[in-house]
Image (cartoon, rainbow, N blue to C red):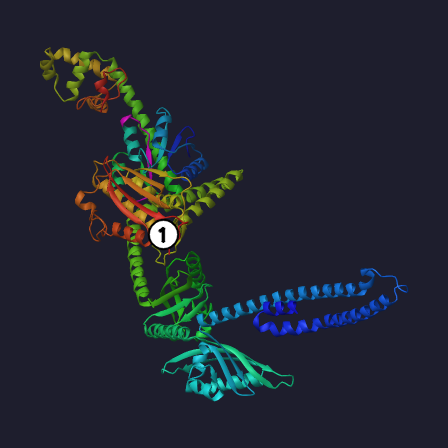
C-alpha cells in the first residue's frame, strides 16, 4: 500500500500527539520523522526526498500556515495535511486554497489520515512527474538558439510566420526553417503540442520558472 | 538609825512604806547585837572592877582579847546590813524601770486609742457597771464620764440595731465568750456613728461570767465608703441591666464575674451557669476555640479586642455577636480584669453574607462567561489528549494485527494512553471547578501554581493569539490565603483583558509577562504586564466601574469583579501604565502566616 521510500514528517508541539501519530504511521508502514516546531522541521527538511507533511496548524512560534507559505516559496511540492484542534473554517479555507491536501480535525481518524497521506503521496508523485516533464522541456528549451527562442515565443502567441518575420525583420522562409527546427528540438509534432509545452514553462504569458540554465528572472513564477 | 533615815528619804514616795518595813525586818538583828553589846559591856566593867580589886588573880587582858566577840558581832552585822542595802537598792531600781515602762505603754495605748478612735471598755457583769475610756467614754455614757450600765448603754444604740447588739452580748456570755458587733450609736448631738465593738467575756472558775472587756472603734467612714461603693455598684448594675447590649466583666484570673440582665435574658441561663468560663457553653462549637484564643491572647497582652462569634440564644438559635472587650484598672492603675459589651449583629452578618452570595453569583456568572469565551481554547486543550489517545489506540490495533505482534510497542502505547486520559480528566476537573457555583474555600494557596494552572487553560488561546508569554515566578513564594478558583478567575480575567487589549491594537507587541514576587508587609504580589496600548489616562481611574466596557466582547465586569474578589481576600488590585508602553495590572494578597479574620 505505502511506498517505504516516502518520508512522512509530523510537526506538532504536543509531544504525546507527535508520538501517537508517529506510532500510527509507523504501524501503517511509513518512515516517520517528528518535529516539535516548524523551525525544527525547516532545519531538517530535505526537498529531494519525496514525502508528506502532517502539520499542526496552531503552534507557538511559526504556525502551520506560515510553514506552508515557506514551503511554497521554496518551491517545494511537499504535500501538507493540516491537523487542527478547532474546526476553524476560515483558516481551513485558506489552507486548502494554498494547496493543502486535507484539513483534518483532531482527534483524527486513522482512515482519514492514511487516506489523506495516500492522496498526498499521489500528488507528490504527480508533482514530481510533472516536475520531471518540465525538466525535459527546460532541457529542450536550453538547446534552442536565442533566435529560435524568439521564434518560439512568437509562434506560441499565435502569430503567423509572416507576422513573425515582419517583427523580427527577416523573411517568412527563414522563420519557417526556424520553426521546423524548434519543433524538432522541442520534440513536438504539432503546434498544439508546442503551445502546451511552452505553457508548462510559462512562455507566452509571464516569464517562466524553474529552468536549469536559464537566467534567474525566468525562475520566478 | 542614820542609815534608816537616809534610806527612807532616798526611797520614792509610794515605796517608802515598803522600805521602812523591809528596813525594820532587817534591823532586828542589829538590835540584838546592840543589846548583847550592852550586856557584855556591863559584865566587863564588873569583871574589870573585880580585877582591880584582885590584881593578882587576873592578868590584865589585851583590848582585842577583851572585846573579841563584840568586834566580830559588829563586823558581821555591818556586812549583813551592807548586803541588805545593796539588794534593796537593786530591787528599787528594777521596780522603777518596770513602773516607767508600764507608764509608757499606758501612754502609748492612750495615744493609739485617741488616734484610732479606739475606745477601751469593761463591763462588770456582776455589778452591771460599764467603764469606758477613750472615744468610747463619750459614746457609752451620755454625760461623757465613762461610767454607765447595760440599760444606758443599750439606750445609746440605734433602735434598729439594739436587738442585734443584745443578742450578740447574750451569745458571747452563753457561748464561747467572744463578742463582736457592728451597730449604730446615737450620739448626744443627734449624730449617728457606726461602731464596731469586739470583746471577750471573762469567767470565774465555775464559768460564771464576771466581766466583758473589749475595744470599740468608730467605723462610720468605712461604712459610708461601703455604702457609696454599693450605691455606685447598684447604679452601674441598673445602667448595665437597662442597656440594650450584653455586658460582661471578668477578674484578673480571666474568669467572668459579671453578666448583665440582658445577657442572662439572651442566653436564658442563670448567672451561676455563666460565671467563670460557664458562658462559653453557649458559644457555637465552631467559634469556641477561636473566641477563647482571642480572649486569652488579648487578656495576656492587656489589649482591647473586638471579635465576632455565635452565641446560643434562649430559643436555641445561634446569633452573631460582636464582642468588644477592654482591660479595666482601678485608680492606682492596678489591673482588675476585663469588661466587655456585645451587640447582636446577626442581621448585619446576614446582609453581609447576602452581599457575599451576590458577589459570588456575579463572580460565577463572569467565570462562566469567561469560560464561554475560552470554550474553543478549552475544547482544543481537551482535544489534544483525545487525539493522542485515539491515534495511540489505532496504532496499537495495527501492532497487534501484525505478525508477530509488537507487544513492547503496545505496552508503551497503553502507558501513554493512560497518561493522556489522566491529562484529559485534569482539564475537565479544572473546567468543572471554574464553572461550578460554590462557596469560596479559603485555604493556603501557592500563587505560582495558580499561574501555571491558568496558563494551562489559556495555552492554546495564547498560541492562536500569537502572544508570547513569559513568566517570572519567584522561588519559594510564600503561600497566601485564598480561594483557588476565584484567584484563578482573577488571573484568567487579567490575562484575557491583556490579550484583548493587545489584539485590539495590533501595533502593540504581543508580549505578556506574568510575575510573582514577595512584597513588603507579608504580602505576595502578582503582576500581569502586557505590551498593548495601555490605559487612556481618563480610563485609568474608571476601569473598575462596572459595565465600563473597555473591550468589544463581554459585559465589562472583568476588572470590577477581579477587584471585588481581591478585596474580599483582604488584598489590593490596581492598574498602571508601563513606561515603555502597555499596561500592568497588579494585585497583592496577605501571606499564609499573616492571619486574617
Residue B22: percent from the left, percent from the top?
Answer: 67, 72
* Mark 1 closeness class: few <14, some 14–19, many ≥20 residues within 10 Å: many
Q: Residue at x 53, y 40 (%)?
A: B407
- Taking depth in this image into account, of A122 and B587 the one nearest to the observer is B587
Q: Give the extent of the magenta segment.
A: A73-87
Q: Which chain does the numbered disc 1 sit on?
A: B
Q: Say above or below: B46 vs B398.
A: below
Examine the residues drawn in magenta and state their main secondary structure: loop
Q: Say above or below: B212 vs A169.
A: below
Image quadrant in which you'd find residue B12: bottom right
Q: Say above or below: B393 vs A30.
A: below
Residue A120: percent from the left, percent from the top?
Answer: 34, 34
Mark 1, residue position = B485
* Quarter of the figure with the C terminus of chain A: top left
Q: Say above or below: B14 vs B546.
A: below
Q: Residue at x 43, y 87 (%)?
A: B155
Q: Is residue B242 visible?
A: yes
* Residue A76 sits inside the magenta stretch: yes
Is residue B323 rendered to the left or right of residue B147? left
Element under disc 1: helix
Image quadrant in which you'd find residue A33: top left
- Taking depth in this image into account, of A173 and A57 the one nearest to the observer is A57
Amino acid at each position: 500500500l505505502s511506498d517505504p521510500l516516502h518520508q512522512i514528517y509530523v510537526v506538532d508541539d504536543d509531544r504525546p500527539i507527535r508520538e501517537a501519530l508517529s506510532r500510527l504511521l509507523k504501524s501503517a508502514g511509513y518512515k516517520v520523522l517528528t518535529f516539535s516546531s516548524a523551525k525544527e522541521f525547516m532545519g531538517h527538511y530535505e526537498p529531494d526526498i519525496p514525502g508528506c507533511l502532517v502539520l499542526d496548524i496552531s503552534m507557538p512560534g511559526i504556525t502551520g500556515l506560515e510553514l506552508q507559505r515557506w514551503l511554497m516559496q521554496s518551491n517545494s511540492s511537499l504535500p501538507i495535511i493540516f491537523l487542527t484542534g478547532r474546526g476553524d473554517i476560515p483558516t481551513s479555507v485558506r489552507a486548502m486554497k494554498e494547496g493543502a491536501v486535507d484539513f483534518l480535525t483532531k482527534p483524527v481518524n486513522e482512515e482519514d489520515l492514511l487516506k489523506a497521506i495516500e492522496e498526498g503521496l499521489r500528488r507528490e508523485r504527480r508533482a514530481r512527474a510533472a516536475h520531471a516533464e518540465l525538466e525535459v522541456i527546460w532541457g529542450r528549451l536550453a538547446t534552442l538558439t536565442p533566435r529560435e527562442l524568439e521564434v518560439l515565443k512568437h509562434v506560441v502567441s499565435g502569430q503567423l510566420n509572416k507576422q513573425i518575420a515582419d517583427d523580427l525583420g527577416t523573411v517568412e522562409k527563414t522563420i519557417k526553417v526556424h520553426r521546423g527546427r524548434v519543433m524538432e528540438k522541442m520534440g513536438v509534432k504539432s503546434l498544439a503540442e508546442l503551445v502546451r509545452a511552452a505553457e508548462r514553462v510559462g512562455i507566452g504569458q509571464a516569464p517562466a520558472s524553474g529552468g536549469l540554465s536559464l537566467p534567474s528572472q525566468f525562475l520566478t513564477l | 538609825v542614820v542609815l534608816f533615815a537616809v534610806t527612807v528619804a532616798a526611797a520614792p514616795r509610794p515605796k517608802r512604806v515598803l522600805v521602812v518595813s523591809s528596813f525594820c525586818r532587817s534591823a532586828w538583828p542589829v538590835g540584838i547585837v546592840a543589846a548583847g553589846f550592852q550586856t557584855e559591856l556591863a559584865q566587863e566593867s564588873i569583871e574589870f572592877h573585880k580585877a582591880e580589886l584582885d590584881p593578882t588573880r587576873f592578868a590584865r587582858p589585851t583590848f582585842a582579847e577583851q572585846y573579841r566577840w563584840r568586834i566580830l558581832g559588829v563586823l558581821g552585822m555591818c556586812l549583813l546590813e551592807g548586803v541588805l542595802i545593796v539588794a534593796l537598792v537593786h530591787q528599787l531600781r528594777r521596780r522603777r524601770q518596770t513602773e516607767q515602762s508600764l507608764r509608757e505603754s499606758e501612754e502609748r495605748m492612750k495615744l493609739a486609742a485617741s488616734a484610732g478612735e479606739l475606745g477601751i471598755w469593761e463591763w462588770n457583769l456582776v455589778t452591771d457597771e460599764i467603764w469606758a475610756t477613750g472615744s468610747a467614754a463619750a459614746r457609752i455614757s451620755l454625760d461623757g464620764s465613762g461610767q454607765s450600765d447595760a440599760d444606758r448603754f443599750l439606750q445609746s444604740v440605734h433602735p434598729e440595731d439594739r436587738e442585734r447588739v443584745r443578742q450578740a452580748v447574750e451569745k458571747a456570755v452563753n457561748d464561747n465568750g467572744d463578742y463582736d458587733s457592728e451597730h449604730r450609736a446615737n450620739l448626744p448631738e443627734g449624730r449617728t456613728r457606726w461602731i464596731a465593738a469586739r470583746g471577750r467575756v471573762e469567767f470565774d472558775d465555775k464559768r460564771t461570767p464576771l466581766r466583758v472587756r473589749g475595744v470599740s472603734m468608730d467605723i462610720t467612714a468605712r461604712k459610708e465608703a461601703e455604702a457609696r461603693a454599693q450605691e455606685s455598684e447598684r447604679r452601674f448594675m441598673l445602667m448595665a441591666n437597662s442597656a440594650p447590649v450584653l455586658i460582661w466583666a471578668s477578674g484578673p484570673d480571666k474568669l467572668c464575674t459579671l453578666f448583665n440582665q440582658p445577657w442572662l435574658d439572651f442566653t436564658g441561663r442563670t448567672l451561676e451557669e455563666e460565671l467563670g468560663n460557664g458562658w462559653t457553653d453557649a458559644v457555637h462549637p465552631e467559634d469556641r476555640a477561636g473566641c477563647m484564643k482571642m480572649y486569652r491572647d488579648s487578656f495576656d497582652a492587656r489589649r482591647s479586642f473586638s471579635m465576632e462569634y455565635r452565641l446560643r440564644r434562649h430559643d436555641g438559635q445561634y446569633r452573631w455577636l460582636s464582642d468588644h472587650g477592654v482591660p479595666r484598672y482601678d485608680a492606682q492603675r492596678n489591673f482588675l480584669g476585663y469588661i466587655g459589651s456585645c451587640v447582636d449583629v446577626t442581621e448585619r452578618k446576614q446582609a453581609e453574607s447576602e452581599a457575599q452570595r451576590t458577589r459570588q453569583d456575579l463572580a460565577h456568572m463572569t467565570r462562566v462567561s469567561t469560560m464561554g469565551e475560552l470554550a474553543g481554547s478549552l475544547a482544543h486543550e481537551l482535544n489534544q489528549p483525545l487525539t493522542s489517545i485515539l491515534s495511540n489506540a489505532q496504532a496499537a490495533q495495527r501492532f497487534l494485527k501484525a505478525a508477530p505482534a509488537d507487544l513492547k510497542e503496545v505496552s508503551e502505547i497503553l502507558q501513554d494512553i493512560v497518561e493522556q486520559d489522566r491529562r484529559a480528566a485534569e482539564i475537565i476537573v479544572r473546567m468543572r471547578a471554574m464553572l461550578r457555583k460554590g462557596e469560596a474555600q479559603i485555604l493556603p494557596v501557592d500563587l505560582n501554581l495558580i499561574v501555571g494552572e491558568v496558563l494551562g487553560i489559556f495555552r492554546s488561546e495564547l498560541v492562536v493569539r500569537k502572544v508570547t508569554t513569559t513568566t517570572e515566578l519567584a522561588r519559594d513564594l510564600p503561600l497566601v490565603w485564598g480561594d483557588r478558583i476565584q484567584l484563578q478567575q482573577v488571573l484568567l480575567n487579567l490575562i484575557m483583558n491583556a490579550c484583548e487589549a493587545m489584539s485590539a491594537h495590533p501595533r502593540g507587541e504581543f508580549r505578556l509577562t506574568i510575575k510573582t514576587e514577595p512584597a513588603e508587609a507579608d504580602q505576595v504580589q502578582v503582576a500581569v504586564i502586557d505590551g498593548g496600548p495601555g490605559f487612556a489616562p481618563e480610563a485609568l481611574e474608571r476601569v473598575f466601574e462596572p459595565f465600563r466596557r473597555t473591550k468589544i466582547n463581554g459585559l465589562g465586569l472583568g476588572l470590577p469583579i477581579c477587584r471585588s474578589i481581591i478585596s474580599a481576600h483582604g488584598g489590593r488590585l490596581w492598574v498602571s501604565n508601563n513606561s515603555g508602553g502597555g499596561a500592568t495590572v497588579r494585585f497583592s494578597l496577605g501571606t499564609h502566616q499573616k492571619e486574617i479574620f
